[in-house]
Image (cartoon, rainbow, N blue to C red):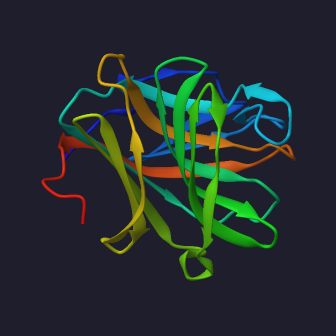
């Protein structure tokens, strides 16, 4: 994997603040920032913070961050986008008292999957998205031990971008420290 400089991407929406601290990037999310489309809740949010660049076929992208947030729906991870109706966010979201690894996959409407990961709290979490064929494989974990979170469709006829994301749907003041953004070759296998 090759490190991507923080200035190589474009923000989907500028955060409240952005500070480079050594090799890390610390961003502060605006209150109410999020992505979601319609399913179950009936609303559309399209105003999260993601720093994205091209995500070509047969490549992988990794994002690492410190999991130290504790408010309902605080979240960080990877955002993969091909426009407002076609995107994926994957990482860790604080929900119902626990950090939960998961993904929201959106093709016109969103879905959501989560699993509790309390043992990841206050650690550096890595989220990896690997693109090949008509799919993206998403893994996440700590200490180099990445577990499979999701295999999702990714239309190869569309142009995709990806990079670090953070949102604060319910509060102001969420600061997320991203420690790494890198890219490389796609994973050879799903498992």
Say which quarter of the image contains residue 2: top left
137 shown above or below 16: below
Say which quarter of the image contains residue 29: top right
- Number of numbered discs: 0
Rendered location of residue 175, percent (x, y): 68, 49
Rendered location of residue 171, percent (x, y): 87, 46
Taking the image as shown, residue 42 lies to the left or right of residue 24, namely: right
Q: Give 124 or 115, whichever is nearer the viewer.
A: 115
Say which quarter of the image contains residue 115: bottom right
Quadrant where the C terminus sits is bottom left
* Residue occupying the point 30% across, 71% down: 144
* Residue occupying the point 65% across, 37% down: 110
Q: Give 96 or 136, whichever is nearer the viewer.
A: 136
* Residue occupying the point 86% across, 32% down: 42
Taking the image as shown, residue 57 lies to the left or right of residue 167, namely: left
* Residue occupying the point 35% across, 16% down: 159
Outermost residue toward the bottom in this view: 119
Q: Give 180 or 133, whichever is nearer the viewer.
A: 133
Rendered location of residue 138, percent (x, y): 39, 53
Rendered location of residue 142, percent (x, y): 41, 72
Taking the image as shown, residue 191 lies to the left or right of residue 48, namely: left
Q: Give 126 or 25, whichever is nearer the viewer.
A: 126
């Amino acid at each position: 994997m090759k490190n991507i400089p923080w200035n190589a991407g474009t923000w989907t929406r500028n955060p409240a603040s952005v500070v480079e601290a050594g090799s890390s990037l610390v961003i502060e999310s605006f209150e109410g920032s999020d992505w979601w489309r319609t399913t179950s809740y009936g609303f559309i949010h399209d105003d999260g913070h993601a720093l994205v660049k091209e995500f070509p076929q047969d490549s992988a992208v990794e994002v690492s961050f410190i999991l130290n947030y504790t408010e309902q729906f605080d979240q960080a991870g990877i955002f993969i986008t091909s426009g407002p109706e076609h995107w994926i966010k994957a990482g860790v979201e604080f929900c119902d008292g626990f950090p939960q690894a998961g993904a929201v996959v959106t093709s016109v409407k969103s879905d959501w999957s989560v699993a509790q990961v309390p043992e990841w709290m206050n650690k550096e979490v890595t989220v990896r998205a690997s693109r090949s064929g008509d799919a993206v494989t998403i893994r996440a974990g700590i200490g180099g031990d990445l577990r499979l979170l999701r295999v999702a469709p990714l239309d190869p006829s569309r142009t995709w971008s990806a990079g670090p994301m953070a949102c604060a749907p319910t509060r102001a003041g969420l600061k997320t420290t991203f420690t790494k953004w890198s890219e490389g070759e796609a994973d050879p296998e799903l498992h």
